[in-house]
Amino acid sequence: MTEQQHDAPGQGIKAGPAPIRYRVNPVTENPNNSAGEVALVGAGPGDPELLTLKAWRLINSAEVVLYDRLVSPEILELIPESAQRIHVGKQRSNHTLPQDQINQRLVDLAREGHKVVRLKGGDPFIFGRGGEEIETLAAAGVRFQVVPGITAASGCAAYAGIPLTHRDHAQSVRFVTGHLKDDTCNLPWRDFVQNNQTLVFYMGLVGLPIICRELIAHGMKNDMPVALVSKGTTPEQRVIVGTLSTIVDIVKSSDVQPPTLVIVGEVVSLRGRLDWVGATQLLRED
């Protein structure tokens, strides 16, 4: 058989499969790559034993750690003494550094060759602005990795004895931020009023009166159980329980402090039987 016959269509050796085309990684292909790297690490809701093994390892090997105010003191103690600590925490109307400056600081430190940990309370991708930060890192060609953390909703609810879903009470759960960029609670309230659903409001203490008022106004029953969890999973955890119509007054008579999480739904009624922590202080209406 001649070479020409061998290569003729339908004869001889068949062509192999087409080469696999991989999507270009904007980080590894960017010419601005640096020797440094940023690890975006979720610190969980507070209890250091809820850290993932990967989070613990990266914290212990970090050269620079930029951390938020919601990272517990017990977790901050895990940072090596040799590491530089930079507090970039935010409070309502009081930001240590604007977000764009935090983003640029991460880029600069990585380009200097440092092993950087960006340590965030809870999970970086759930109301943690983690997506904004790694967008900046990717655009700058900085290597990064993301380590998920236990988000406040699941961690605080579990430590308060409140299952977020339950076959008899809730087949879905919805996470909602308690305030938006303009510090309003302009939310799709009608969508929140559903049967067999649990609502979890992050950062909901200031907006609690609005949350209760709007849910009732859009059709949720007045006696829907509500729990407010303050400093969840920490030794200072406090849980306040009431209903949509009573929880605001109960909170007013307490000295509860942020960070707080607001849980709305029938699952809250299970807490009386499922409060496994036991040491938490429960305030109930008479």
Image (cartoon, rainbow, N blue to C red):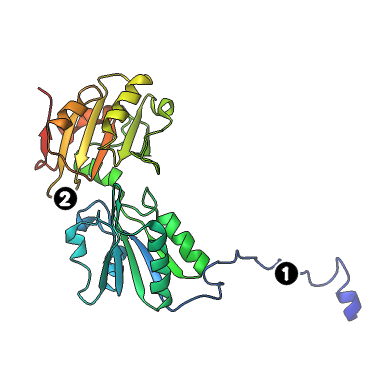
Residue under label 1, please give it: 16
Of residue 212 and residue 166, the one placed in the foreground of this image is: 212
User: Where, quadrant-wise, is the N terminus in this rendering?
Assistant: bottom right
Discs 1/2, front? 2
The kind of residue tagged 2 is Thr
Query: What residue sits 86% from the left and 75% below the top?
Result: 6
**Quadrant hosting residue 68:** bottom left
Residue under label 2, please give it: 234
Residue 187 image offset from top left, x and y in percent: 41, 33
Of residue 130 and residue 98, the one placed in the foreground of this image is: 98
Residue 10 image offset from top left, x and y in percent: 85, 65
User: Where, quadrant-wise, is the C terminus in this rendering?
Assistant: top left
| 96 vs 250: above or below | below
**Quadrant hosting residue 276:** top left
Query: Badge 1 local density, few (<14 within 10 Å), some, or many (20+)?
Result: few
Q: Secondary structure at mark 2?
A: loop
Query: What residue sits 87% from the left and 67% below the top?
Result: 9
Query: What residue sits 22% from the left and 73% below the top?
Result: 80
Residue 169 image offset from top left, x and y in percent: 31, 27
Query: Badge 2 local density, few (<14 within 10 Å), some, or many (20+)?
Result: some
Query: Is mark 1 in CB contact (under 8 Å) with mark 2?
Result: no
The kind of residue tagged 1 is Gly
21 sits to left or right of 44? right
Query: What residue sits 55% from the left and 72% below the top?
Result: 30
